[in-house]
Image: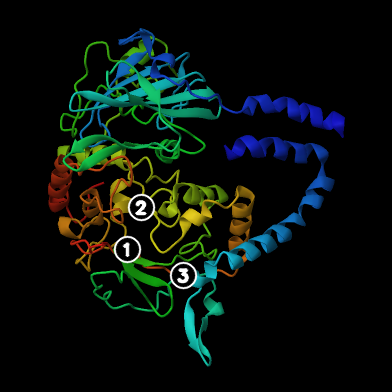
Amino acid sequence: MTLNRSFPLAALGLLLGASLAQAAAPAQPKLIRRGAYLVSIAGCHDCHTPLKMGAKGPEPDMTRMLSGHPDTLKMPPAPKLPEGPWGWAGSLTMTAFTGPWGVSYSANLTPDKETGLGSWTEAQFLQMVRTRRHLGQGRPILPPMPVQNLQLVSEPDLKAIFAYLQSIPAVHNRVPVPIEPAATPIPMH
Amino acid sequence: MRALLLPVLALTPVWAKAPAPPRLLSQTGLYAAPGVVAARNLAYAPQYPLWTDGAAKARWIHLPAAIDGRDEAGWVFPVGTKAWKEFAFGGRKVETRLLWKTGPRTWVFASYAWNEAQTDAVLVPEGGLPDAAEVAPGLRHGIPSRADCRDCHGQERVEVLGFTALQLSPDRDPGALHGEPLRPGMVTLKELVARRLLQGARPDLLTRPPRIEAEPATRTALGYLQANCATCHRADRPIPGLDLDLRPQAALRTALAPGSFPVPGQPESRILSPGHPERSALLHRMASRNPVAQMPPLGTVRVDRAAVDHVRRWIADLPLVPSH
């Protein structure tokens, strides 16, 4: 589907020559700036940039910006949850969460090729949003990720977000895979 | 500039928007009369069927011209190809899925839900139809969304997954899990060649039909993984960050690669751990229907017990260093 739309545009660019291609180049910084703005207001940093303790309390660790749950932080087994209405708990970094869905860790969104989005294509990113599935094909994306909100974002804005995420510093950080919930479901009500 | 634009715009109908699928299954070309499949549509049965909660399946394909079979692993279907797959549970038809190639790179996906009287089926909304039929006490089969269809059949290069050289090979695996016998009239490689519906295939395709070369238990296991897992787990459609290719020629190499993957309570677990089914994430995920672990992640709500039992035995007997 992407090809259908992009091919005539690509052909148009070839026909009109280098002047248009040069004119298109400045659009990328603008796209990235828009992506940065969207990532900022959408709250992506809230869970994907780990908190560290600073002089004034918890603050985002910008050396690990958007790199998800730190692989250097070895988590003990998740605490046993009470029987409701309290339902979930989170780590002090705000990157690990336990609830009725199991234990989930916020993903590495930096362009690291092995552990982040560096090997992703834009189409795969869009597919991930469209399907609400991990890697665009696997398990459902887990709470507390508000992927349903991301699905309301327009395709141009999603492309801007992806362009921004591909432009930030890569952080090599292999986020743990999620842990299944205990065999006995926790009563929800 | 306008003169330059016109030739480009003239190209666009080639990539014109795909047509909408018909509202009723009876309008798709499957039937010549109510309940009578049109003679131009060929019935077939893959030797390694996909597990769908134990559904009984029937499949047909319409080929308006020959398949380009030069790439044995990736046949290119002619424009106008239609493939249907009917799913029945407990003797009642529940859904029929349609794949329809409407242009060189465009496919229409559609699912049809059968009516109570079993006389026709109605187009399902794009988002699918949950709870379409009970397949076991408390478990209900949902008709997948069109996005789900694309997840398995491909985004840009779509394939008719059960209609491949290996799946239609007359050299059928006698141990294939849930293997269906070829009924009279079903199309195989031989019929495709005889009807000139397969062109460009290697000349010895019929004397040396595709086969998974392995001892029987491995042949069956790899055939099952090919049908149920390798539509997503394959190197030519890489899933980012997961170097796993479960097609027969690569399955053992990539699944045995170093690295870990969690099986609850098994700190030494890997994707495939020879001699240790309990440490093998592949088996754990096949046997799970917890959304975090389930594989395949869609299209099934019941564990395939026969497959789990076979794969468990196969892993237990798997030599530490595979011979191929």
The subunit carrying tag 1 is B
Q: CA distance from mark 1 to mark 2?
A: 20 Å
Visible residue check, residue B123: yes
Q: Are marks 1 and 3 on the same chain?
A: no
Q: CA distance from mark 3 to mark 2?
A: 18 Å
Report the amino acid beneath label 1.
Gly
Circle 1: element type: loop
Looking at the rendered image, the quarter that the C terminus of chain A falls into is: bottom left
Can you tell which mark lies on residue A149? none
Would you name the residue on which mark 3 appears? A68
The subunit carrying tag 3 is A
Would you name the residue on which mark 2 appears? A139
Rendered location of residue B222, percent (x, y): 25, 41
Circle 2: element type: loop
In the depicted structure, whether residue A48 falls above or below residue A53: above
Report the amino acid beneath label 3.
Gly
Q: B296 or A57: which is nearer to us?
A: A57
The residue at 19%/41% (across/down) is: B304
The residue at 78%/48% (across/down) is: A21
Would you name the residue on which mark 1 appears? B259
Quarter of the image where one finds residue A31: bottom right
Circle 3: element type: loop
Q: A6 or B124: which is nearer to us?
A: B124
> Relative to B75, is B220 on the left or the right?
left
Report the amino acid beneath label 2.
Arg
Q: How is the image coloured?
A: rainbow
Rendered location of residue B292, percent (x, y): 31, 56
Quarter of the image where one finds residue B175: top left
> Relative to B281, is A153 on the left or the right?
right
